[in-house]
Every structure is written in structure tokens, then in C-alpha cells.
């Protein structure tokens, strides 16, 4: 996708600044090409993607910036606008190795895609953006899908949107080592502005569902609690959910993932499960039912019912899946007693990060003030709250 942005487009203006920063990082020369890849919020389907369930994310108009320029050799130099130390890779060298740094995300994509074009030329790439890292807005998928898009365009690979999604997913799982589900790269790579993506994570099928931007706003409140150390806890949840499925599979004929286990079977067998696995399975199976109900509510225009499922999802994440924290709970509770909020819950994996709120657009300012004041009274600091627009997905943006 190529979009020539309107002169008033803030993303275009920010990318113009990013292009100027490129010269500082890599020196003078041909003007770099600039690209954007969005983040995402997920409204329903919490921790369902790796359990084969349905999810309802949407891309947001904040994300990752890329500025890229060809080199005459076979080296890739990667730099970050927010970190002093960059990374240099040799396309003629041995297979790339994980280094435990931010550059692992693009490096994983590079390692997979350089095999498709053995004589690909070198590049200088500057990464930046306006998406908070570690906030649960899928900065990693934004980087990985965006990197796949940039390399596709710079190297002329001819990839489809789904090809880029799959490369990004493989980079996170196989190279970085995060056992994530399929939702985040799909939400970024298949985005359409003003629509939710209904993604069935069992078979990968998807549909776009309208969400009227004139009626509702999506706001995100940031706890300021970062999730850099949460990767291990996330992988634990993946392992626990898999163990719950393995315990229930013998009495669930035809089931291929935890999502497939009938609720009636779970209720009959719950006493035989270890308490921890019982709680994990209970969240997943009820969240599947909530997410289908939320879809029906959205399709019938019943935003109150949709929002009730968001609040119920957060309670389950807090009590059964153990991925919330006090800061997240205070924000959700404040949203619940604020007029004009249809629903709210933590977004992303949890363990900190952000709360997403579905708000009556006419009451956005009053809701944001109420939620911020409640949080400030408890933690003595005011949380950033932003209202996001939708986004059309990864693209090159021209002057």
C-alpha cells in the first residue's frame, strides 16, 4: 500500500522530522524513503490468540517510523532515534544471532527475508516512532511487520500483506523467542482505518467489522508500568494454557486447542484440574464466549452490551489469569464509574502497560479528566491518556 498523505497529516510531518534525523545518524546523501507501521489495541479476546480463540483488535494512528536508504555494499546498519547504540549486520556473514537488544526484532525479519533475495543490497535504516514501547500497544509487531514492509519495498520482494504478517510472526517466535499468538502481526498488517479486525486464531480467517468513529472513541490510558521483564511471565501463561488443554483433551473429542473444549466439559472436569490450570482454562473458555457475544452486540449496535464484555474480561484477567496490576485496576475501576464509558480493560498481555476504553465520543474530555484524577489521587502522578484514530496499516509515505 502506498499513500500520499495530506499536508496536515501529523504522521507525515513526524516522518519528515524522522528523515532529517536520518542524516544525523548516517550522514549526508540521497534522501531516505520513509515508512510507517501502526500499533494496535485489542478490545476483546484477551490471551485468546495462542489458545485458538477469536480476537477483536484495531490498528491505531501511532506506531513505528522507518527511514531507509540503499548502500553500495552488503551491510545493513540499523539505528534507533531513541538509543545511542545501533547495530551493524553483514548480509554475507553467517546466520544472525539474537543479542537481547531492540535490534533483535528487525534482525529476525532480516534473517528470514534475506534468504528470498540472496543478492539483496545493503541498507541504512533508522527506527523511531510515537508508540510507547512496553505499554501493551504491540510495539514489537509494529516493528516486525513494518520491517518486513520496508524490506519488501526496498528489495522488491513482491510479498503480500499476509506474507509480511507471517514473516513478522516467525521472527518473534523463532528468533526473538516470544511464544506469541497470531493476533498482533495480523492486527497491524491487515489493518483498515475505522474498523475492527475479527480474527479467528484457530484457522486464521478474518473479517473487518465497522466501528462508527462518529459515535465512539477509543482512548488508551498508560499506567507507566513497563513490561520489559514480562516476557517470561507471558511465556508461562502460554505453557500453562497448553497444559490445561492437554489435561482436558482426552475428554474433548476433536479438540485441537483450548478454545475447542466445550464449557460443559470444563465444568464437569474442573475438580480434576490443578487449581492454577483450572483458573487459566476458566478464563480462556469464558473469554471465548464473551468475545462471540461482543461481536453480536457490535453487529446489532448494542455498545452497552459490548462494553459489559470488556469489563468482564478485565475482571477475569485480574482474578483468573493473574496478568493485571493495581495501576491497571484503578484505571478500569475509574472508567467503570465514569459516565460515558461503554467498556474498559487492560490491553496487551498485561503485567502493566495500558487500559483501553471505549467511550461515547461526546464525553471523551470529561471521561479522560475523571479517570486521570482518580489515578492521580492514588498514585500521585497523572497518567497519559490519548484518544486514537484508526489506521490503514503499514505504508510508505511520500512528501
Image (cartoon, rainbow, N blue to C red):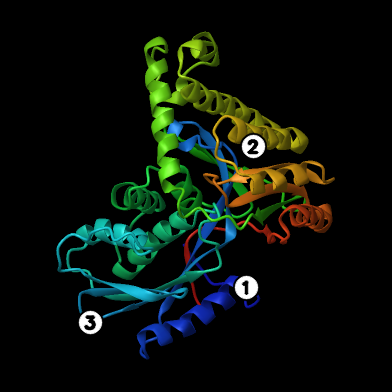
The answer to whether 171 appears left or right of 293 in the picture is left
Residue at 55% x, 63% y is 131
Q: x, y (%) of residue 192?
A: 56, 53
Residue 141 vs 262, above or below: the answer is below
To which quarter of the image does residue 391 belong?
A: bottom right
Q: Toward the viewer: 89 or 147? A: 89
**Residue, disc 3:** 72
Question: Are circles 1 and 3 on residues that touch, CB within 8 Å?
Answer: no
Q: x, y (%) of residue 387?
A: 70, 59
> Upstream in the sequence, badge 1 or badge 3?
1
Estimate the spatial distance between the alpha carbons at disc 2 and disc 3, rounded to whole Å.
Answer: 52 Å
Residue at 62% x, 28% y is 290
Instruction: Judge whether residue 101 can be spotted in this image.
Output: yes
> Upstream in the sequence, badge 1 or badge 2?
1
Residue at 54% x, 46% y is 351
> Upstream in the sequence, badge 2 or badge 3?
3
**Residue, disc 1:** 10
Q: x, y (%) of residue 144?
A: 39, 58
The answer to whether 174 appears left or right of 251 in the picture is left
Frontmost of labels 2 and 3 is 2
**Residue, disc 2:** 314
Estimate the spatial distance between the alpha carbons at disc 1 and disc 2, rounded to whole Å.
Answer: 33 Å
Residue 73 vs 112, above or below: the answer is below
Q: Residues within 10 Å of mark 3 (few under 14, many from 20)?
A: few
Q: Which residue lies furthest to the bottom in this view?
A: 28
Helix, strand, or loop for circle 2?
helix
Amino acid at each position: 500500500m502506498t499513500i500520499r498523505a495530506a499536508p496536515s497529516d501529523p504522521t507525515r510531518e513526524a516522518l519528515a522530522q524522522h528523515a532529517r534525523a536520518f542524516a544525523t545518524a548516517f550522514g549526508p546523501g540521497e534522501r531516505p524513503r520513509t515508512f510507517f507501521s501502526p500499533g494496535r489495541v485489542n478490545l476483546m479476546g484477551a490471551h485468546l490468540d495462542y489458545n485458538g480463540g477469536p480476537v477483536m483488535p484495531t490498528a491505531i494512528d501511532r506506531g513505528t517510523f522507518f527511514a531507509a536508504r540503499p548502500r553500495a555494499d552488503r551491510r545493513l546498519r540499523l539505528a534507533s532515534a531513541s538509543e545511542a547504540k545501533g547495530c551493524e549486520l553483514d548480509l554475507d556473514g553467517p546466520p544472525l544471532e539474537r543479542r537481547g537488544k531492540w535490534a533483535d526484532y528487525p534482525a529476525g525479519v532480516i534473517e528470514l527475508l534475506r534468504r528470498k533475495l540472496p543478492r539483496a543490497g545493503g541498507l541504512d535504516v533508522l527506527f523511531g516512532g510515537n508508540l510507547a514501547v512496553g505499554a501493551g500497544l504491540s510495539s514489537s509487531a509494529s516493528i516486525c511487520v513494518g520491517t518486513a514492509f520496508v524490506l519488501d519495498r526496498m528489495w522488491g520482494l513482491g510479498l503480500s500483506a499476509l506474507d509480511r504478517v507471517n514473516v513478522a510472526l516467525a521472527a518473534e517466535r523463532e528468533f526473538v523467542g516470544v511464544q506469541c499468538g497470531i493476533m498482533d502481526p495480523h492486527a497491524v498488517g491487515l489493518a483498515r482505518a475505522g474498523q475492527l479486525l475479527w480474527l479467528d486464531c484457530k484457522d486464521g480467517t478474518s473479517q473487518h467489522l465497522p466501528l462508527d468513529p462518529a459515535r465512539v472513541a477509543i482512548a488508551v490510558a498508560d499506567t507507566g508500568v513497563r513490561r520489559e521483564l514480562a516476557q517470561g511471565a507471558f511465556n508461562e501463561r502460554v505453557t500453562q494454557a497448553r497444559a490445561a488443554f492437554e489435561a482436558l483433551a482426552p475428554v474433548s473429542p476433536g479438540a485441537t486447542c483450548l478454545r475447542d473444549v466445550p464449557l460443559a466439559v470444563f465444568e464437569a472436569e474442573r475438580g480434576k484440574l490443578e487449581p492454577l490450570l483450572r483458573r487459566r482454562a476458566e478464563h480462556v473458555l469464558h473469554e471465548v464466549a464473551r468475545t462471540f457475544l461482543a461481536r453480536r452486540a457490535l453487529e446489532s449496535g448494542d455498545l452497552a452490551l459490548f462494553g459489559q464484555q470488556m469489563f468482564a474480561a478485565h475482571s477475569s484477567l485480574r482474578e483468573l489469569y493473574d496478568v493485571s496490576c493495581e495501576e491497571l485496576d484503578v484505571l478500569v475501576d475509574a472508567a467503570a464509574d465514569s459516565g460515558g464509558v461503554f467498556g474498559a480493560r487492560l490491553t496487551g498481555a498485561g503485567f502493566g502497560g495500558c487500559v483501553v476504553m471505549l467511550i461515547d465520543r461526546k464525553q471523551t474530555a470529561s471521561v479522560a479528566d475523571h479517570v486521570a484524577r482518580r489515578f492521580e489521587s492514588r498514585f500521585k502522578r497523572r497518567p497519559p491518556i490519548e484518544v486514537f484514530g484508526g489506521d490503514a496499516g503499514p505504508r510508505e509515505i511520500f512528501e
